[in-house]
Image: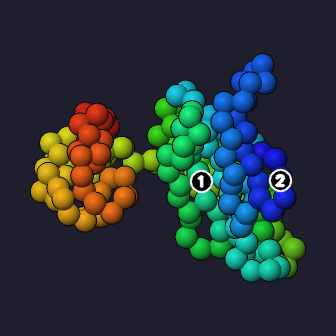
Amino acid sequence: IVQERDAQTLYALSDSGVLHWRRTLSETASFNWTPSLDAAGNLYLYAMRWLTPHRFDNQVAILCYRPDGTQEWATAFAGPMGYINTAKLLVQPDGRRFVLSGATVTETGGQDAYIVQYAVPQRGDANNDGCVNDADLLVVLRHFGGTSEDADLNSDGIVDDTDLLTVLFNFGSGC
């Protein structure tokens, strides 16, 4: 991660220094300098966005990028977490769960520890039961051509063939 002008840029390089991809990150957040990888080569990093000018109210988000540099998903944790002075992101090899832990400094100068566990939902799990099966296929088929949030798995505003293929390609995952 390199600071360039008003934004930070994430570079993915091979061991020999060959550039695989480059992505400009949001200028409104500060990104961690120790990203984590899972066994599939997905990159995970956390970002902090200041909610107030005095920097004692941060909102934390976790971002996941595929090996080709496209963003897979992002999740923000609700509410401020104080001023984070240490943080460590641990990702399971399969990328399905991760833990963010560290310490925050309070406005009075004290410290609070935090641990946040998060499980990534199965791709194609339209009904959020942890398993991609015939129930998910039925949800997508029932809303095909519509705008259902549950069935719109890629969040593009319409339930279409991409959502159907997401269920089919991930059928049986998590079961």
**Residue 81 appears left or right of 1:** left
- Across the whole image, how many numbered discs are drawn on residues? 2
As drawn, the label of residue 82 is none
The N terminus lies in quadrant: top right
As drawn, the label of residue 4 is 2
Give whichever of 30, 128 is nearer the camera. Answer: 30
Of mark 1 and mark 2, the one earlier in the sequence is: 2
Which residue is located at x 28 percent, y 48 percent?
163
Question: Do the numbered discs 1 and 2 sit on residues whose CB atoms are within 8 Å?
Answer: no
Which residue is located at x 55 percent, y 27 percent?
39
Residue 68 to residue 163: above or below: above
Q: Give how far across and how far down residue 167 sits, in percent.
A: 26, 42
Q: Give how far across and how far down residue 156 sits, in percent.
A: 37, 58
How far apart, in angstroms, are the residues tagged by discs 1 and 2? Answer: 22 Å
Mark 1 residue crowding within 10 angstroms, few (<14) / some (14–19) / many (20+): some
Give whichever of 110, 63 is nearer the camera. Answer: 63
- Could you tell me the amino acid type at mark 2? Glu
The C terminus lies in quadrant: top left
Which residue is located at x 26 percent, y 40 percent?
165
Give whichever of 71, 42 is nearer the camera. Answer: 71
The furthest residue to the right = 109
- Residue designated by label 1: 62
- Could you tell me the amino acid type at mark 1? Ile
**Residue 17 appears left or right of 43:** right
Q: Quadrant of residue 93?
A: top right
The furthest residue to the top = 16
Q: Of discs 1 and 2, which sits in the foreground?
A: 2
The answer to whether any part of residue 129 appears in the image is: no
Mark 2 residue crowding within 10 angstroms, few (<14) / some (14–19) / many (20+): few
